[in-house]
Image: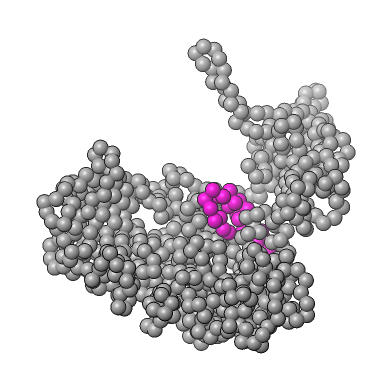
Amino acid sequence: MGWRLAATGDALETGFIKRFDPQYWTVNFPRPMLAAVTNPAPDALRIDATFLRRNDLAGIIWAAADDGSHPLLAYETARDFRGCRLRFRWRSAGVAPLDAVHGPVMTIEGRDAAGHARAWYVRLWNYAEGGPDDAVVTLDFAGLESGFALPGEAVWAGDIDRLFLSLVPPGYDPASDAPLPAPAEGWAEISAIACDGPGSVLAIGEGLIPGHGMRIATGYDDLYHLTPARVLRSIRHLGYRGAINHYVGMSHYMRLGWDGAAGAYLAGPAGGAIAAPCAAWHRDFAARAWAQGQDVIWSLSYELLDQNCPDAWKQRAENSDPARTGWDPPSTLLSPAHGGAMAYLRAVAEAFVDIAADAGMPVRFQIGEPWWWVMPGDGRICLYDPAARAALGGDPPSIPDVRGALDAGQRALLDQAGALLAASTAALRDAVKARAPGAEVLILIYLPTVLDRAAPELKRANVPLGWARPAFDRLQLEDYDWVTAGDAGSTARGIAEASARLDYPVEEQHYFAGFVLRPEDRRQWRRIHDAAFAAKARGTADVFVWALPQVQRDGFTLFVIGDEEAAVQAFDDVDFPVAIGARATVEPGFSTAIVTTSAGREQRNADWADARMRYDVGPGVLSRGDLEALIAFFRARYGAARGFRFRDPTDDSSRGMTDEPGFADQPIGTGDGIATRFPLAKHYGDQVRRITRPAAGSVRVGVDGVARANGWSLAEGGVIAFDEAPATGAAITAGFRFDVPVRFAEDRLEAGLAGFAAGEAASVPLIEIREGEA
């Protein structure tokens, strides 16, 4: 299995779409209103909107540059629209009609013929034939005019960034953000979309990666602006098959109502738990996923956008500070003790269960990361909201800081809180199973928070024994803070502890590998890839890459290298016959690009940071027995197909070239209090050589000049894996003997008895295989 970070222009397989293809439109709107765009037919798109304020405005967008797709699947950037003619049927209800003062307007953003930034406003009614709610609109971009009435200002459509088509509620007032008397549901459908003329066809990435065995996780909060068709095309084309773990989010699914006393729009009003646009999007998502052979695990957490959460529902610290996350804007955590909050979650769960059932797919539901929040700065645990206080005896003991040693009363309180959390998740599980008998219910635990080593007693509250098997059908584990920090030791300990405490065997577990928060940290994908495949190697039932929005943003791509390599092992961990190799000749090599100017001067550029070794083991073939051993070894490696270990007779030690190694020979890193894995390396002046094939039993390790006999292990690829992260600033050193990973340089072997009988050495070249992180 391989991986890469693809970039724009990397697509090798392309197809074509018509400009304005319905599945590539997006939607945008100001919060707290909501809107969603779907595709009811191949030539149609529909926007569903819930307007809450008088100045709410939603827009459907066509972008000249595709910023919503994976680089291998994006359509080409094309800013010149002058040769295009767009025609469609417009139908709408619950929004300002075409002939209204604030009726639908297409805002064209780009630059004029002189290159100056401009926006033009094209009123659709000026180009419509029919009624204000049902008309055919024809837009010839070579002759459009901006303005309320025609004639207007000519639009120059030769350098466009995007088109923004607006929808507003009846009675729209751009100067007022006052609440509407009641939420207003509206929709518009654009159908029979047709585009012709020069420039009406766009190239698009069409590569279809074969299934690679990994699953994908998604999140509605980051995908709400795309069509479900576009999301699912990405999933399938990127090789993700089987279950999709879909987080319904914490900010875009709620049906909101105005609370005059709170002066805010809050979740939980009558009329349904989830908003109409969210329901429309997810109905389309579920039907399309099932049609392409994929089921959905619906994920719901105890987290809500803080500004839309009733105050009484929030977890609180002992001084009544609400639990708030570090997101911007912040989310909050619902109290497991509050009846109204938990009833709301059950209603939301039932709504998504109904969507799954209506699509005909099996119901699979995840309770995502339920916990009692701990304030990141000072360790205050948020189990003191009024509902929790009442459930915990009325006057629960004070826990000023959950980190460190706690007394018996404080530990008992955490046990009570854990039982309360477990009861709330059990009620949510039971509601799902009552709604859909036979449903599978899973629980997701975020290990770095609930098994924080600085708060060893916290698991009493946040990994309650009430979750132990068979409370749930699957245990799902996630640990992205550890993975992206390179803290593999914490990952191993955390998974082992959670598995033991809750008694779920690995074949009843799922693992989530991810995620890269910021695009500048995209190199973290290597660690995520490695963690995902380590989970596979453990026997984990399903491994999910978290999450699709970041996969698309960074171009993360998994791929199967090919059937031939799958059938033939790339490397056999066996030694080349030592007696033959002892007489090998050695040839370090570099790659240098040399350009000679017309004046005879040279410009040189070193392509490699380290030498690549070549060996000739022919001089070691001195007898019939050597020849037979060489031929047998060559045949077993299928010629050049498989790599193997080779002991360099001139350089096999961390000390000098061949001296006996010691623990302080080579620096391999500096502790930061987090990292537990340090790759072996040998230094040659300024050059650093990764050592991926140390000799078994030869490795010695030191920390700050002191030999470390235990507390570490040698991991695959020549990596020292500590049980505990070395302290910040600690100097990590190692000594070792090592082999060089090599392969036969050719698929033919020329050697015979007559040659060495006459004193002629055969030529049997080997070449080094580059391993380890680039």
SS assignment for the magenta stretch, majority: helix
Front-most of 105 and 755? 105
Place of residue 122 in the rendered image (x, y in percent of width and height, measured from the top left): 20, 55
Q: Is residue 92 left or right of residue 235?
A: left
Place of residue 442 in the rendered image (x, y in percent of width and height, measured from the top left): 58, 75
Front-most of 642 and 551? 551
Q: Is residue 264 visible?
A: yes
Give residue 285's quadrant in the image.
bottom left
Any magenta on residue 45? Answer: no
* Residue lying at the far left of the rendered structure: 151
* Above or below for 509 versus 705: below
Q: Residue at x 47, y 45 (%)?
A: 7
Magenta extent: 514-541
User: How was this image coloured?
Assistant: one colour
Front-most of 41 and 757? 41
Q: Residue at x 85, y 45 (%)?
A: 705
* Above or below for 651 versus 175: above
Place of residue 102 in the rendered image (x, y in percent of width and height, measured from the top left): 21, 64
Any magenta on residue 540? Answer: yes
